[in-house]
Image: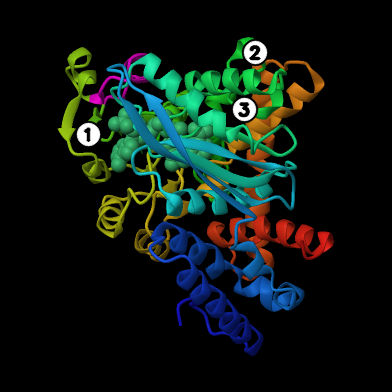
Amino acid sequence: MTITKEMKMTSKEEKVQKYMNKVYEKVIERNPNEKEFHQSVKDVFQSLIPILAKKPEYMEKNILEQLVEPERVITFRVPWVDDQGKVQVNRGFRVQFNSALGPYKGGLRFHPSVNLSIVKFLALQQIFKNSLTGQPIGGGKGGADFDPKGKSDNEIMRFCQSFMTELSKHIGPDVDIPAGDIGVGAREIGYMFGQYKKIRGSFQAGVLTGKGLNYGGSLARKEATGYGTVYFLQEMLKGNGMTLNGSTVVISGSGNVSIYAMEKAIELGAKVIACSDSDGYIFDYNGIDVETVKRLKEGNGDRIRYYVREHPSATYVEGCTGIWSVPCGVALPCATQNEIDETAAKQLVENGVKAVAEGANMPSTAEAIEVFMKSDVLFGPAKAVNAGGVAASSLEMAQNSMRMSWSFDEVDAQLQEIMKSIYQNCVEAAKEYGQEGNLIAGANIAGFQKVADAMIEQGVI
Ligand code: NDP
């Protein structure tokens, strides 16, 4: 047995479990060596036993087996010429996982660790995340094993152009709308947008989101994932009689999600005492100055260690995983997958953490999540917590379609409403299916239900 449910099961649930295990075993057999993808399928399946037991049509129509097979997987060569005139070759990916709710939507990641397993795990999670936002978007994800670190601006441009030369054949405003993710910010989106426009011979603003404000980008998109993470956290704390004001927060990473999570948390009265990059972390019990982090990381992509030059009260520690040993009331992992393992989770619990909200995608291992759940730590899962980014992307698409721009406050107000309603939907779905207080189950069930119903309504296609 691989998929399990802790509580005693009814006979209907046992039947579901057998079905799930069969599908899960097939996933492992058909996708060998894709450990992140397996982890992500398991994470979703574990929560779905009660809903499949209550709605047998999902099993009768074999929805799970359809759901775990991407509609389309594209891999391609990305050749480009470096500044020394040498030809370099990377591998590009786009996984168009599920279009039941709308055109595929999800980010592009440029990082040396990118492989098919990582892109598939991200794309699968994206299906449910997008469903949770209530916006009409399906799930996809893509990227390349390209390392932007240390590359010149011209090299980045040539890479982005080559990447888009192939990707452009597979995307479009009604087909698939990529956005940024790790290693892909406004600069990369700009170069890819320019190349798409040149190839297509038409200005289709709705083909990418996260664009610059000069050519169809949305105000508040840059801030949306980080702000949304904190809006969700705020709801989660409020729902359990706590408040962010006055709490101490540790946030990993110092990229797009981390910076704006820091900014919003500080604005709402929290003290952010530590953040990191892939080399190490800084901590300062007086509070981190987010403007310095922004200047270092958004400007030249400098290392976080340089922060202490300007703030002597802060300490830099080499090695990024140690950040979870810094005592705090709230932990926001906002860097990358599997950054909190069982040991880190135990350390956080021993140090009195009250809430963990996942700003990054799948930052906690399954073992770490178990530690948090057993210790009654409030836990917000990524697909709900960080859905603000894609929600704002969808608002960017709406503005592009209407050929108009909303103000920062208008987008931010919609974002807050969306995050509140995601939280409420998670709480209600968990309650309806006997898992009160379990936001992981709530997010998976609420996200799944809409997609599964739309798949059934559209027939076997
Ligand atoms: P960025 O590339 O902007 O930033 C990533 C940050 O994490 C960098 O500071 C990087 O440091 C750091 N980092 C990478 N690995 C580690 C590590 N092992 N330990 C500590 N720090 C590390 O990416 P984003 O902020 O956009 O994305 C972060 C996460 O959020 C990802 O999981 C992404 O999928 C998710 N996400 C992003 C969304 C968005 O809108 N951008 C939307 C939803 C989810 P360094 O500078 O050394 O590389």
- The amino acid type of the residue labelled 1 equals Asp
Q: Could you tell me how far apart the alpha carbons at marks 1 and 3 are, in whole angstroms?
A: 30 Å
Residue under label 2: 215
Q: Earlier in the sequence, mark 3 or mark 2?
A: 3
- Does the magenta segment cover residue 89? no
| Residue 427 picture quarter | bottom right
Q: Earlier in the sequence, mark 2 or mark 1?
A: 2
Residue under the image location 31 percent in, 50 percent down: 352
**Magenta-colored span:** 286-304
Q: Is residue 42 visible?
A: yes
Q: Nearer the viewer, residue 296 or 72?
A: 72
Residue under the image location 71 percent in, 57 percent down: 451
Q: Are marks 1 and 3 in contact (CB under 8 Å)?
A: no
Mark 2, secondary structure of its residue: helix
Asked if disc 1 is less than 8 Å from ligand 1, the answer is yes
Seen in the picture, residue 40 relative to 106 is either above or below; the reply is below
Q: Nearer the viewer, residue 366 or 273?
A: 366
- The amino acid type of the residue labelled 2 equals Tyr
Q: Could you tell me how far apart the alpha carbons at marks 2 and 1 are, in whole angstroms?
A: 35 Å
Disc 1: CA contacts within 10 A as few (<14), some (14-19) or many (>=20): few
Residue that sits furthest to the bottom in the current view: 11
Residue under label 3: 209
Mark 3, secondary structure of its residue: loop
Kindly identify which numbered label has been placed on residue 279: 1
Percent from the top left, x then y, of residue 109? 46, 37
Residue under the image location 34 percent in, 20 percent down: 297
- The amino acid type of the residue labelled 3 equals Thr
Percent from the top left, x then y, of residue 416? 64, 33
Q: Nearer the viewer, residue 453 or 423?
A: 453
